[in-house]
Amino acid sequence: MSAPPNNAAVGLLTRLPLSAQWGLLFVLSAALAALLEIAGVPAALLLGPMVSGILLGVNGGAVRVPRLAYLGAQTIVGCLIARAISYDIVRAFLKDWPLFLGVVLTVVVASGALGWLMSRSRALPGATAVWGSSPGAATAMMLMAEAYGADVQLVAFMQYLRVVFVAVAASVIARLWIAATSGAAVPATVWFPPIDGTNFAETLGVAVLGGILGRALRIPAGVLLLPIVVGAALHIFGLVRIELPPWLLAASYALLGWNIGLGFTRRILLHASRALPQIVFSIVTLILFCCGLAFILVKTLGIDPLTAYLATSPGGMDSVAIIAASSKVNVSFVMALQTARFVIVLLIGPRLARLIAGWTEAANVRTEKAQES
């Protein structure tokens, strides 16, 4: 499946056959992902293909990810998120639900305010600024943004830049507070481990069923959301053990990364570079705000500082989970707060994005009328 180059047929790759472009994309993606993995960069298996896709996209590459493969990758990510929602996490949330709800809503309001400020300054469109600022699983936020009409490339740029900032900050704080236990050597990935055929078949069944229901019910981002809902329910009650081998996750991340990257144009990159100061400012501000919430948790509940920081850390749920699992923290508390925020953002994110976009448009109209008069 292919489409005309997205840069008005201008670029280094416009005369290269599609087969050669796919080969270049595969090789470049594997090399960049490997380098990022060695460097310890979070989401390397997605960022490597995404950067490779950007390089091809802005240089006239015409390859495109088939729609069915892209939707299939979303269902696998949905199953991955469902697997992370365990009984222990639900129990931890129910034990302290007023606290969790208060912290989550505070972070969501803060991120929405930062999105509004960026859209009000016209650095980014309203819905794009809100989804880009939304804390949660970056891949899921990007997919939701696409479903609701935001500029998915700019949202991805903001989300994954924040993932890197948050992961680096969390890693540094973990090293300072617990004598570098988070820096312990990570076991080498076994890409083709033995798998349980029944569990794997049930996992694929959840992905396929959820994806079909999501499309049939015409729910925005339903191909992602229905596998999460169905998979989480079956997983929590012990009816299904979700099994996702590394090779399948890597392929799914690559498809998502390519789909994002190949949609980039020179214009989008220029726009992103112009808005970079505001984007970095919003990321740093949100991190500092969450540090303040963590301080409150430490003082009021006696929670250790690292647990409080990781629990309130704004986004990058996967990378936070990895750091938490390799550190002496209350993992259930951390993941309960992260998961609760993710679910709430999924529920109220679309309405919040529309609301802030409407406010921004109305405010800009009033400003223009005032200037004219």
Image (spheres, grey):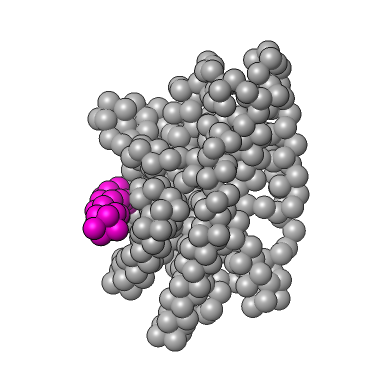
Residue 236 seen: no
Residue at left offset 46%, top offset 73%: 289
The picture quadrant where one finds residue 216 is top left
Residue at x 44% of width, y 28% of height: 71
Q: Which residues are magenta?
A: 349-373
Quarter of the picture holding the C terminus: bottom left
User: Residue 41: horizontal and vertical position, in percent?
Assistant: 67, 52
Q: Is residue 244 left or right of residue 177?
A: left
Between 373 and 24, the one nearer to me in the picture: 373
* Res 21 → quadrant: top right
- Residue reaching furthest to the bottom: 299
Residue 200 in magenta stretch: no
Residue at left offset 43%, top offset 34% = 75
Percent position of residue 95, x then y: 33, 70
**Does 344 sit left or right of 24 as displayed?**
left
Residue 14, percent from left and from top: 65, 18
Relative height, residue 286 to residue 316 (above, below): below
Residue placed at 45% from the left, 43% from the top? 142
